[in-house]
Each structure stands twice: as structure tokens, then as C-alpha cells.
Amino acid sequence: MEALLRAVTLAGGQSALARRIGKTQSHVAQWLRRGRVGPTACIPIEAAVGGQVTRYELRPDVFGKPPLSSPSSPNEAVR
């Protein structure tokens, strides 16, 4: 739930986050009460806050661990 609270704060409140993802404020409030975001809302939330909160943080039980970042050049992988 900490990740969802951060997303709400970053978006400027429950209503603002809801508008950004095409949901109602009551959806966001329900997620906060339940302590869990619906899986289909995780990617839109991630996009709405510019990736500052990720789907992996919102629902690790669904999305698992974040992927390892790929090296910027093939030579970095060898170093």
C-alpha cells in the first residue's frame, strides 16, 4: 500500500490520480481501503506518475520482481 500512497501523492491526490488513469476517485479510495490495486490498473498508474512508482511495487504478487536493467552498450555487459 505504500507504493499506492506514493502514487497518490505524486499525482496530487486521489482525484487527480483517478483522472489520469480514467477511473473514479472512489476506485482509488477502495484500493487504499483494501490495501491492494487491481492488476489492470498498475500499468496506467505507473505511466501516470512517470514510472516513479512501478507495477512491480504496486503488485509484486502479479508482476514479480523488476527486470534487471540492460547495459547501455554490449561492452558494459562484459566488464
Image (cartoon, rainbow, N blue to C red):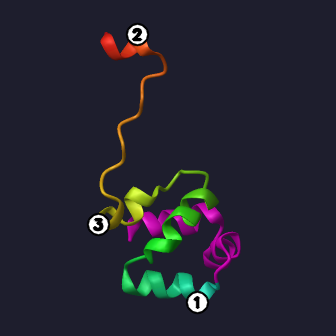
Q: Residues within 10 Å of mark 2 (few under 14, many from 20)?
A: few
Q: Nearer the viewer, mark 1 or mark 3?
A: 3
Quadrant for the N terminus in the image: bottom left
Query: Which residue is drawn at the image coordinates 69% and 69% (left, top)?
Result: 20
Rendering quarter of residue 68: top left
N-term-proximal mark, 1 vs 3 = 1
Q: Which residues are magenta?
A: 1-23
Going by the image, does 15 lie left or right of 37? right
Q: What residue is disc 3 on?
A: 61
The C terminus appears in which quarter of the rendering?
Answer: top left
- Cα–Cα span, label 2 and label 3: 34 Å
**Which x, y percent locates residue 9?**
57, 65
Q: CA distance from mark 1 to mark 2?
A: 49 Å
Quadrant in the rendering for residue 62: bottom left
Task: Examine the residues drawn in magenta and state their main secondary structure.
Answer: helix
Q: Residues within 10 Å of mark 3 (few under 14, many from 20)?
A: few
Q: Are marks 2 and 3 in contact (CB under 8 Å)?
A: no
Q: Amino acid at mark 3?
A: Asp
Q: State the mark number for residue 26.
A: 1
- Is residue 79 found left or right of 71 in the rendered image? left
* Amino acid at the residue labelled 1: Ser
Q: Considering the numbered disc 2 on the image, is that residue within a helix, a strand or a loop? A: helix
Which marked residue is nearer to the observer: mark 2 or mark 3?
Answer: 2
Circle 1 crowding by C-alpha within 10 Å: few under 14, some 14–19, many from 20: few
State the separation of the CA atoms marked 1 and 3. 24 Å
